[in-house]
Every structure is written in structure tokens, then in C-alpha cells.
């Protein structure tokens, strides 16, 4: 018999409101119901601002990177910048085509991680995930450090405080993103569109002067003098790979499909095409005008600045507006990571490769722990590298091109699998369904070529930047993959140890009654219930229902394994876990007669390795904090040693 009590008293059905709730509401906004999730999605216009800021901001330095490399072969080699840019645009088109296909094939998001998992296996999938997660952290550190460098260039007296300024910007962006995707997108859309407007207007004005024969040339710029090299194929490939930083961020939309309004795949696909088209126009326009205006790579002035002051005049309002918009977009580029890192982290955690806490949505329906983890790691990098962009850049871009390579390789394998199907056949994968496509051959060729091209870029970038710090990423990504697998093995072993599939007949346990908070029905739960019955005949299991599907599973299992004990289900529409439980315990405590003691028995896992404790919620610890000071309440932990079988 199941007794699922849902409305025992209004005093404990109401959500717990701690004293800090008022401050929390001011900082990140009032909490949202789980049912509000469909209303927190975004449209294409806001989606472009949220997911494209990283890619679009790269136009502020991608042309510089090409010219810096070509300058090693002398000023004459700078004429190759436009052919290199066109080659990059072709690669951008291929990558865009691949991810547009990915968006429709994998409508639940995931990008390179999901594609690699379905088509290449767990190893490549974890490698893609590690590469992207690393790149998202670096994007925050690099973009904010770059933006602060623009500020300290204008106000040199702030240079000693650049680390603190960077950390302050991270704090502000973290708080805004904790308010939700919809609100953060609205807040950051204005600077993104301001940058787009200023840049496109500048390029248009530059082309007007070019076609009217009034285009001026850049003056008062001293070209950087580095060691001169011969113009070789490797140097051109190095310039190509350096300029491919313009592609960073292209994968972001495929990872964030679930943030879009319905139809999600269609809206995400259109936004991707918008982003790539705008990026191509801006990148081509800047590189073309830089060649026509004889802009030079310089340590003291960016190409953007050279074009702006030549077209508008140094110190003019339009020139300052252009540089101001550039500074803003460099800082806003970090928002792409804030949008995608938590989602990708949640996917990994859902597959058991990162701590499960990353799957939890906070009071504003965002992956709170993912946002905080991103802010923490990015802050650590800024502190370690003293917010110096030049020190962080060598770590950048390798991860994203590794993910490009794995994604396109996975899509090529997907088309090969589809070629084996017949019309009407369907094959279910973890993240999608395979169906025959008569155009599979052309798509496979494009994806295969794109995989080769992005692999070449990755290798060239890794070799050319290896001594400058790229070796850190080369070591870091395999290390992260190892950690992912260790976490996965822990969760897998834990599930095996807790499984009831081969546990035998439901045990006959002596009747007892205490409050036993449970997070599910498994061996640890049964051990705790057995101990509770040895203490009292009045035992109530308490389950906080956050998800309806999980609630149904708990009730089904309890029917078999609950042995007639009461099951109290507390609905939690705001996804709180401890607050409803504490309210219920306090409500029961208030009903006690004199000299009665309330006992809370908490099932606790004891992993075989100490660091596995970091992967689990510490229920007893938080209950002690919540019940601190209340008289005659005893909290007891019943350990279940993972790996020891009954």
C-alpha cells in the first residue's frame, strides 16, 4: 500500500523563503516555476546576440592575425591576405553547412559532442567535449582580457588594476546570466547590434570611397619588424590557420538549440546562416579594405583602428564609436560561452561524465552550477596569466578546431551510415534518428573535406604556437578526457551497486517509523529504512518531487520495495530540494508532544575513493545546517558502502 500525501498542511507545502531571498531577487530576479521554462526561450534576433557575439567579435582581430604572419616575409607578402581570407570564407561556408545539417539532425543540441558520440564513439565524443569546454573557458578569459586591454590603452593609469577590472566584469556577466537566457540576451543584444551597425557602416563607407576613387591610405603606422622568413607554403598555411580564429564560435548555435523558440531547429538554423553571412561580409570587407588602404600589422594600433581613423579621422566621434563598439563586442564575446558552457556541461553530466550537479537548473531555470564553474575557471586563468591577452592567445583556437574536425568527421560517418539504408528505413541513435537521404554522397564529400581542412588548421596552429603555450592545451585535453572517464566509471559502478535488478525478493523488514529523506528507491534506501524500523514503529519516507517522470518511477518502485511504509511526496515546483524537506521536518517537529524526539535517518553513500564524495550531494550536512538550533531533533546517517554487497 502506498500513502502518497501531497497536501497535509499549507504551512509546509509553501516553499521555504530564507532571509536572503530578497537580496537574491534583486541580484538575479524572482524564482521561476518549472512550468515557465517554455516561456524563457528566445527568438532569432536575440539568439544572434547571445550565440554569435564570439564569432562576430573575431573580425576585430582575425585580419590582424593574417597580416602579422605574412609580414614575416616582408611587406610584399601582405598582398596574399585577401586570397587567404577568401580561403577562410570557403572553409567557413563548409563548417556552416555542416553545423546547419547538425542542427536539423540533432534538434536537442549538443553539437560536436553529440555528433561524435553517435558516430565516432565515446573516446572522440569526450575529446570533443573536453576541447569545447576548454575553449569556452578560454573564450571568457581571452575576450574579457582583450576588452580590458582596450580600456587600459585609453586610460593607462588603470593598467595596474586590469586583473581586478577583468574579475569585476566576470562578476557582472555571471550575475546577468544567472537571471536567465532571455534576460541576458536582451541585456547584451544592444552592444552586439551597435558593433554590427558601426562595423557594417564603416565597411560600406569604405567601399563607397573605393568605388568613387576617394579612398585614402593609412599613414603614420610603423610595421612591426620581426625575424624575416621566406614566403613558403607553411607560412601561408600558418597565416591561414591564424586567420581561422574568425571561425571560433561558429559551433555555439548548434550547442544551444534548446534555447530557441519553436520550431527550435529551424530558428537555430536560420540564425546560424545569418551569423555566417554577416561574419563573411565583415571579414571580407575588412581584409579587402586593409589591402587597398595599405594597412600594416602593428604592435601599437589594430587594423580596425587604422581603417577607422583613416575613414573618419582620428579622434572623431564616429572613430571613437567604432572603437567603443569593438571594445564592447570583445567583452560581450564571453556571453557565448556563458550561453553554451552550462548546456554542454549539463549534457556531459547527464551522460555521467561530469558531476551530476551540473544538470540542476537554478531558480531562474538556468544551469547555475555550470555558470558558476565557468566564471571560476575563467577567473583563475585571468589571475594566473595576469589578464594578458598575448599570454592567453596561444591556448586559444586549438580546442575549437579539434571539435570542428570531430564534428565534421562524425557527420561524414553519419552520411556513410545513411547510404546503407533504404527508403523508409529508420535507425535510432542516442541523439537522433537515421533516415535515408538521396543527397548523402555530396554531403559526405563536403563534410569529409571540411574535416581535413580543419584538421590541417589545428595541426598548423598547434605546431606554430606550441612553444608559446599551446602545449598546455595539448596536455590539458587528454587529461580532461581521462577525468571524464573516471567520473563516468564511478557513476556506472555506483548505479550497478545500487541496482535492484538482481537483488532478489523484496526484504521483510521490522516495522519502525522515523523521517527518512530519500532521493530514489535503491539499496541504500532499503538499508536506511531497515535501520529506521529498528528505532521506531512510526516510519515515513519523504521524497521531494522536482520532476514528474522521476516521481512516477519512485512510486512504481515503492509499490514493490516499500513494504507498506508511508511515502510522503512533497511537490517542489521551484525545484528546491532542501527547503521543502526542512519545512516538512519543522512542521512534524511542531506536532510533537512533550519529551518526544524526532529522528531523521539519512541514507549516505560511502565511496571507495575519497574524491568521489565531491560527485554527490551531502544531504546530512545541509540538513544539520538547516536544523541547527532546533531542540530534540536527531540526524543520523546510515552509510551504504559502495562495492560491498549484501
Image (spheres, rainbow, N blue to C red):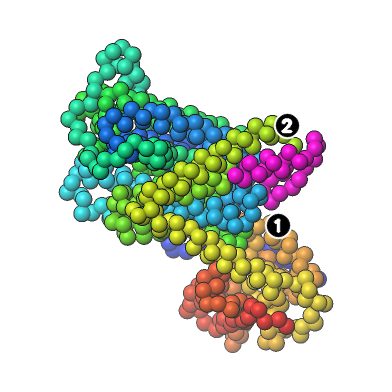
Left or right relative to 446: residue 73: left
Density class for disc 2 (Cα within 10 Å; few <14, some 14-19, many ≥20) is few
Q: Residue furthest right?
A: 505
User: Which sits in the foreground, 226 or 6?
Assistant: 226
Q: Residue 32, position in %: x, y? A: 54, 51
Q: Is residue 412 magenta?
A: yes
The residue labelled by disc 2 is 438
Q: Is residue 146 magenta?
A: no
Q: Residue 429, position in %: x, y? A: 71, 49
What residue do we see at 48% from left, 43% from top?
456
What residue do we see at 68% from left, 84% from top?
531
Split into 4 quadrants, where in the image is the C terminus?
bottom right
Residue 522 found in image quarter: bottom right
Q: Is residue 15 visible?
A: no
Residue 597 found in image quarter: bottom right
Q: Is 222 located above or below residue 527 in the figure?
A: above
Q: Residue 107, position in %: x, y? A: 63, 42
Q: Residue furthest top?
A: 212
User: What distance separates the C-alpha of mark 2 from that of mark 1?
Assistant: 39 Å
The residue labelled by disc 1 is 549
Q: Is residue 152 visible?
A: yes
What residue do we see at 29% from left, 52% from top?
388
User: Which sits in the foreground, 300 or 29?
Assistant: 300
Disc 1, SS: helix
Left or right relative to 22: residue 612: right
Earlier in the chain: of badge 2 and badge 1, it is 2
Q: Which mark is residue 35?
A: none
Disc 2, SS: loop
Specify start and end residues of the magenta stretch as a single range: 409-435
Left or right relative to 258: residue 480: left
Q: Residue 244, position in %: x, y? A: 43, 39
Amino acid at each position: 500500500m502506498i500513502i502518497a500525501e501531497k497536501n497535509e498542511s499549507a504551512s509546509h507545502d509553501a516553499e521555504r523563503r530564507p532571509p536572503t531571498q530578497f537580496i537574491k531577487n534583486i541580484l538575479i530576479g524572482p524564482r521561476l516555476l518549472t512550468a515557465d521554462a517554455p516561456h524563457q526561450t528566445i527568438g532569432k534576433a536575440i539568439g544572434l546576440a547571445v550565440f554569435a557575439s564570439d564569432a562576430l567579435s573575431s573580425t576585430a582581430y582575425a585580419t590582424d592575425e593574417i597580416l602579422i604572419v605574412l609580414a614575416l616575409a616582408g611587406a610584399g607578402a601582405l598582398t596574399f591576405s585577401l586570397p587567404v581570407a577568401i580561403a577562410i570564407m570557403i572553409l567557413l561556408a563548409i563548417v556552416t553547412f555542416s553545423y546547419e545539417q547538425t542542427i536539423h539532425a540533432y534538434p536537442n543540441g549538443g553539437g560536436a559532442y553529440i555528433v561524435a558520440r553517435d558516430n565516432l564513439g565515446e573516446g572522440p565524443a569526450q575529446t570533443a567535449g573536453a576541447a569545447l569546454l576548454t575553449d569556452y573557458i578560454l573564450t571568457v578569459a581571452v575576450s574579457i582580457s582583450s576588452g580590458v586591454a582596450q580600456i587600459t590603452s585609453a586610460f593607462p593609469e588603470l593598467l595596474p588594476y586590469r586583473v581586478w577590472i577583468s574579475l569585476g566584469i566576470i562578476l557582472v556577466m555571471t550575475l546577468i546570466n544567472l537571471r536567465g537566457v532571455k534576460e541576458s540576451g536582451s541585456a547584451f543584444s544592444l552592444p552586439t547590434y551597435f558593433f554590427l551597425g558601426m562595423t557594417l557602416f564603416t565597411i560600406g563607407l569604405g567601399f563607397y570611397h573605393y568605388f568613387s576613387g576617394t579612398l585614402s591610405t593609412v599613414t603614420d603606422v610603423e610595421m612591426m619588424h620581426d625575424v624575416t622568413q621566406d614566403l613558403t607554403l607553411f607560412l601561408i598555411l600558418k597565416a591561414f590557420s591564424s586567420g581561422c580564429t574568425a571561425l571560433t564560435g561558429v559551433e555555439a548555435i548548434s550547442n544551444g538549440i534548446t534555447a530557441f523558440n519553436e520550431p527550435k531547429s529551424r530558428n537555430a538554423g536560420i540564425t546560424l546562416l545569418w551569423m555566417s553571412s554577416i561574419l563573411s561580409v565583415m571579414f571580407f570587407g575588412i581584409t579587402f579594405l586593409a589591402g587597398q588602404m595599405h594597412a600594416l600589422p602593428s604592435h601599437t594600433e589594430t587594423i580596425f583602428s587604422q581603417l577607422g581613423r583613416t575613414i573618419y579621422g582620428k579622434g572623431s566621434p564616429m572613430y571613437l564609436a567604432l572603437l567603443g563598439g569593438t571594445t564592447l563586442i570583445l567583452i560581450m564575446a564571453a556571453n557565448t560561452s556563458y550561453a553554451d558552457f552550462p548546456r554542454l556541461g549539463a549534457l556531459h553530466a547527464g551522460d555521467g561524465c561530469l558531476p551530476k550537479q551540473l544538470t540542476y537548473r537554478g531558480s531562474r531555470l538556468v544551469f547555475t552550477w555550470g555558470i558558476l564553474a565557468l566564471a571560476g575557471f575563467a577567473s583563475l586563468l585571468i589571475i594566473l596569466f595576469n589578464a594578458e591577452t598575448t599570454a592567453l592567445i596561444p591556448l586559444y583556437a586549438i580546442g575549437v578546431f579539434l571539435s570542428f574536425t570531430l564534428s565534421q568527421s562524425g557527420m561524414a560517418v553519419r552520411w556513410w551510415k545513411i547510404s546503407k539504408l533504404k527508403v523508409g528505413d529508420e535507425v535510432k541513435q542516442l541523439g537522433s534518428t537515421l533516415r535515408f537521404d538521396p543527397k548523402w554522397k555530396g554531403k559526405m564529400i563536403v563534410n569529409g573535406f571540411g574535416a581535413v581542412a580543419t584538421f590541417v588548421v589545428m595541426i598548423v596552429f598547434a605546431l606554430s604556437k606550441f612553444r608559446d603555450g599551446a602545449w598546455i592545451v595539448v596536455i590539458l585535453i587528454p587529461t580532461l578526457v581521462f577525468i571524464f572517464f573516471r567520473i563516468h566509471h564511478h557513476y556506472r559502478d555506483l548505479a550497478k551497486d545500487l541496482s535492484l535488478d538482481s537483488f532478489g525478493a523484496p526484504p521483510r523488514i521490522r516495522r519502525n517509523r522515523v523521517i527518512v529523506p530519500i532521493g530514489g528507491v535503491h539499496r541504500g534506501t532499503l538499508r536506511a529504512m531497515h535501520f529506521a524500523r529498528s528505532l521506531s514503529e512510526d516510519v515515513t519516507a519523504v521524497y521531494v518531487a522536482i520532476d514528474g517522470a522521476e516521481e512516477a518511477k519512485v512510486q512504481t518502485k515503492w509499490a514493490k520495495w516499500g513494504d507498506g511504509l508511508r511515502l510522503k511526496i512533497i511537490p517542489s515546483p521551484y525545484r528546491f530540494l532542501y527547503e521543502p524537506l526542512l519545512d516538512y521536518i519543522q512542521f512534524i517537529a511542531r506536532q510533537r508532544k512533550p519529551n518526544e524526539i524526532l529522528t531523521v535517518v539519512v541514507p549516505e553513500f560511502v565511496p571507495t575513493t575519497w574524491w568521489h564524495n565531491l560527485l554527490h550531494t551531502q544531504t546530512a550536512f545541509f540538513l544539520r545546517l538547516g536544523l541547527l538550533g532546533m531542540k530534540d531533533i536527531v540526524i543520523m546517517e546510515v552509510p551504504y558502502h559502495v562495492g560491498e554487497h549484501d
